[in-house]
């Protein structure tokens, strides 16, 4: 017979369990009996929720769920601290994990979340920062006008504003034919997927930077928007000087109405956080930053989606379509985003009584 290492013998040479083990088992049993009814109740509630039978759950059980979860979590902490038996620990760990997902876990799957997010949540978040959007739009227009006027007065400003990768042949003094060649229609889409990935990376970097700089009370975001739009204004002046303003605008509009909208929203989202931190009103600074940050994060998810779509438009329709088709796509996208952001989901907002 195999004798346990901790076993001892009495005078009749019978195996006797040491007192310490008996006490531990007794303590574990007492601990479980004192709380087992609550554990069983919690387990029953979780079983119904996991089977999707929420409607059959009594109101008192639903209201008791958070308290039962905290009680089970406390029991688990005590069980670990006092080194109770492995079966009790395993049971409590499983119970607490299941309860956590029901109390704090996501309520929607990916597709359900996407349907809810795109079905009005994003547009409502964007309408909530309308003041910041107006400020950012004014700054962007002012930046483009400033870039145009600076280059019109002194062409040296063109080389100070426009990045080097855009000044290969697109420079002041270039002929109409040279500039028109940069807007030509490609014969195939070969290699454009890599171009799309590069453009997405660049545009995403600008948008994220505009958003991140908003934490410094929004001022650096405004400066970044001014600089980027000054580049656009300088290039508009260049093509206009050779009578190609319409062709350049059409070439740019395919992706520009989506990309510039995304950059506008990113800058406005960052500025929204900075503005709320600078002027929190009756809230504390931390509370204002948390509330505005949650709203801005929703906007930034939409910005990333827009940038992915803009990169595809920039790499394929813009390169393969003619001037009229480019302008048509650009105008359509402008109307689509404006309608979606500022009108879609408004009826749902009014019905629910939530401020847009």
Image (spheres, helix red, strand yellow):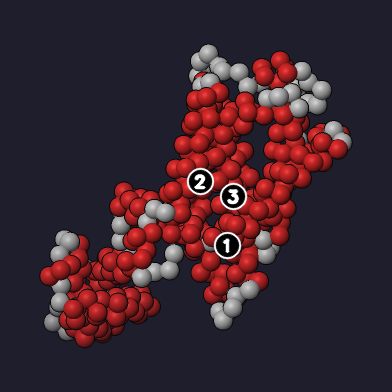
The residue lying toward the viewer, choosing from 164 and 352, is 352
Q: Where is residue 334 in the image (x, y as percent from the top left)?
A: 50, 41
Look at the picture and state if 215 lies above or below 208: below
Q: Label 3 neighbourhood size at 10 Å, few (<14), some (14-19), many (20+)?
A: many
Q: Which residue lies furthest to the top in this view?
A: 187
Q: Where is residue 219 in the image (x, y as percent from the top left)?
A: 71, 60
Question: In the rendered image, which residue does mark 1 sit on?
Answer: 131
Sequence order check: which comes first, mark 3 or mark 2? 3
User: In which image quadrant can residue 99 be found?
Assistant: bottom left
**Residue for point 68% across, 25% down:** 244
Mark 1 or 2, which is nearer the eye?
Answer: 1
Question: In the rendered image, which residue does mark 3 sit on?
Answer: 264
Q: Label 1 neighbourhood size at 10 Å, few (<14), some (14-19), many (20+)?
A: few
Element under label 1? helix
Q: Are marks 1 and 3 in contact (CB under 8 Å)?
A: no
Residue 304: mark in rendering: 2
The residue lying toward the viewer, choosing from 73 and 109, is 109
């Amino acid at each position: 017979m195999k004798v346990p290492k901790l076993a001892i013998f009495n005078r009749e040479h019978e195996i006797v369990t040491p007192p310490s083990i008996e006490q531990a088992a007794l303590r574990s049993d007492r601990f479980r009996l004192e709380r087992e009814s609550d554990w069983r109740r919690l387990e029953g509630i979780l079983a119904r929720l996991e089977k999707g039978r929420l409607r059959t759950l009594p109101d008192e059980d639903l209201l008791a769920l958070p308290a039962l979860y905290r009680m089970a979590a406390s029991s688990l902490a005590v069980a670990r601290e006092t080194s109770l038996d492995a079966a009790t620990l395993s049971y409590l760990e499983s119970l607490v994990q299941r309860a956590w997902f029901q109390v704090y876990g996501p309520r929607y799957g990916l597709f359900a979340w996407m349907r809810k997010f795109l079905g009005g949540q994003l547009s409502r978040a964007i309408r909530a920062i309308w003041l910041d959007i107006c400020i950012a739009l004014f700054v962007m227009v002012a930046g483009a006008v400033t870039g145009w006027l600076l280059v019109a007065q002194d062409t040296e400003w063109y080389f100070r504003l426009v990045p080097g990768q855009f000044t290969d042949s697109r420079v002041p003094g270039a002929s109409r034919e040279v500039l028109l060649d940069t807007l030509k229609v490609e014969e195939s889409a070969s290699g454009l997927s890599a171009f799309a990935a590069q453009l997405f990376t660049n545009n995403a970097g600008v948008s994220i930077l505009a958003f991140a700089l908003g934490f410094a009370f929004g001022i650096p975001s405004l400066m970044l928007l001014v600089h980027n739009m000054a580049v656009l204004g300088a290039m508009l002046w260049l093509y206009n000087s050779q009578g190609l303003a319409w062709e350049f605008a059409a070439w740019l509009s395919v992706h520009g109405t989506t990309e510039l909208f995304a950059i506008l929203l990113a800058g406005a989202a960052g500025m929204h956080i900075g503005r709320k931190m600078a002027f929190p009103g009756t809230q504390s600074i931390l509370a204002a930053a948390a509330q505005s940050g949650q709203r801005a994060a929703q906007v930034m998810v939409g910005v990333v989606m827009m940038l992915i779509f803009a990169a595809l438009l920039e790499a394929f329709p813009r390169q393969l379509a003619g001037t009229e088709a480019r302008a048509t796509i650009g105008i359509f996208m402008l109307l689509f985003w404006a309608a979606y952001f500022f009108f879609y989901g408004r009826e749902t907002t009014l019905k629910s009584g939530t401020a847009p």
